Image (spheres, helix red, strand yellow):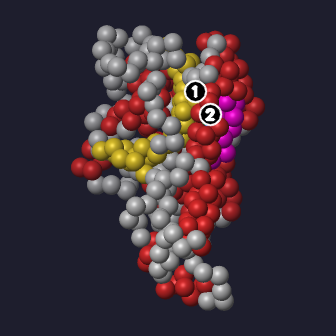
């Protein structure tokens, strides 16, 4: 499939998910997934800020005018778009982009944190500069952009923020300690922003894609790449920014398959106080890790409350202490 060709634009598209009147910012939207997201958001009626610094795969070479190309593609197809070349690593540039968006369109409904690059190396060979650069662009970049739109979304009582996480953070991948840490950091950022945004109509989610882009072109076979199109990820993004969007969801997407990743808590076992508590944990480690009837707590505080509840029950003899 040719990812460079603009998709057919159908202004009559009869779809339940419409975004007319919504204003969206997509970072890293000059190519790959961000470009597919930006085109689809515009096709659904959103006014789109196409942000991209235009850097190389490792973030070291800058300057390609790809944001403007995507914005122009949207405009030529009858949509509304403006380009931004601000780096998500530059707080002033991000604030200026947000000011310009507000001056032009008066609101910001959707933020898709998608920009980033890779510096893969085994942990032994990775410099701290490579580690920090990846945390800066993926985690801090998303935090900066989210912070810059947060009060606007609060005042509007409507907002949708999507963090682009990765299986690398959720489950680990060789050579991606920096990237995995940043991507799992985004899940943590989502967990709290979703709680804080709830009463203001701000819903925050993560998308974990598997897509054929320049980031992954060497990782998969040709026939696999043909299935892993960005266009098979973007419908998940549209769901996460729709009026009916969930919040606190980690949606995994690839090759047309959609699933959810969750941080779960096992039921837990109470251990008696005493000098051999560590040995008791060792003995019962299988039971402690047993996922039968595990739960997804709504908040970290809920985990502590559950521990206190389980301990109180065990102490009162209400449950078996095996
Ligand atoms: P990509 O390299 O095509 O897209 C990333 C875009 O971000 C590039 O156009 C780049 O110029 C831009 N960018 C980099 N640094 C920037 C900065 N400081 N400010 C603004 N823009 C910047 O790669 P792809 O695959 O489309 O990646 C998009 C997102 O999806 C990334 O966050 C990536 O980590 C994530 N992801 C991708 C996966 C995949 O299978 N392709 C898997 C998991 C996550």
Nearer to the camera, 312 or 263: 312
Nearer to the camera, 275 or 195: 275
Q: Position of residue 265 (x, y in %)?
A: 50, 61
Q: Position of residue 298 (x, y in %)?
A: 55, 48
The residue that disc 2 covers is 197
Q: Position of residue 242 (x, y in %)?
A: 45, 26
Quarter of the image containing the N terminus? Answer: top left
Q: Position of residue 151 (x, y in %)?
A: 70, 27
Point 58% across, 46% down: residue:
191
Vertical relation: 320 (above or below) 264:
below
Label disc, if present, on residue 201 of the rendered structure: 1
Q: Residues within 10 Å of mark 1 (few under 14, many from 20)?
A: some
Point 56% across, 88% down: residue:
279
Nearer to the camera, 115 or 12: 12
Whether residue 268 can be seen here:
yes
Label disc, if present, on residue 250 of the rendered structure: none
Left or right of residue 168: residue 87: right
Q: Residues within 10 Å of mark 2 (few under 14, many from 20)?
A: many
Measure the alpha-carbon separation of dots 2 and 1.
6 Å
Q: Residue furthest right?
A: 92
**The magenta stretch spans which residues?**
139-150
């Amino acid at each position: 499939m040719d990812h460079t060709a603009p998709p057919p634009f159908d202004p009559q598209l009869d779809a339940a998910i419409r975004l007319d009147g919504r204003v969206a910012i997509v970072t890293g939207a000059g190519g790959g997934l961000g470009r597919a997201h930006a085109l689809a958001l515009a096709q659904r009626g959103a006014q789109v800020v196409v942000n991209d610094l235009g850097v190389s795969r490792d973030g070291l070479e800058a300057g390609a005018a790809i944001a403007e190309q995507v914005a122009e593609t949207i405009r030529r197809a009858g949509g509304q778009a403006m380009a931004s070349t601000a780096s998500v690593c530059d707080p002033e540039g991000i604030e200026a982009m947000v000011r310009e968006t507000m001056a032009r369109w008066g609101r910001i409904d959707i933020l898709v944190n998608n920009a980033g690059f890779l510096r893969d190396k085994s942990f032994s060979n990775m410099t701290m500069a490579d580690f920090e650069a990846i945390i800066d662009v993926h985690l801090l970049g998303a935090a900066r952009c989210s912070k810059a739109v947060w009060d606007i979304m609060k005042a509007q009582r409507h907002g949708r923020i999507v963090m682009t996480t990765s299986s690398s953070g959720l489950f680990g991948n060789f050579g991606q300690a920096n990237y995995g840490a940043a991507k799992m950091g985004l899940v943590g950022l989502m967990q709290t922003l979703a709680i804080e945004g709830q009463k203001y109509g701000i819903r925050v989610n993560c998308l974990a894609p598997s897509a054929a882009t320049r980031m992954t072109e060497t990782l998969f076979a040709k026939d696999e790449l043909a299935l892993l199109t960005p266009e098979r990820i973007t419908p998940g993004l549209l769901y996460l920014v729709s009026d009916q969007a969930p919040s606190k969801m980690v949606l995994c997407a690839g090759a047309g398959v959609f699933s959810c990743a969750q941080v779960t808590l096992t039921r837990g076992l109470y251990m008696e106080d005493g000098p051999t508590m560590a040995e008791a944990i060792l003995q019962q480690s299988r039971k402690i890790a047993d996922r039968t009837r595990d739960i997804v707590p709504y908040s970290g505080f809920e985990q502590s409350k559950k521990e206190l509840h389980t301990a109180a029950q065990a102490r009162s003899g209400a449950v078996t202490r095996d």
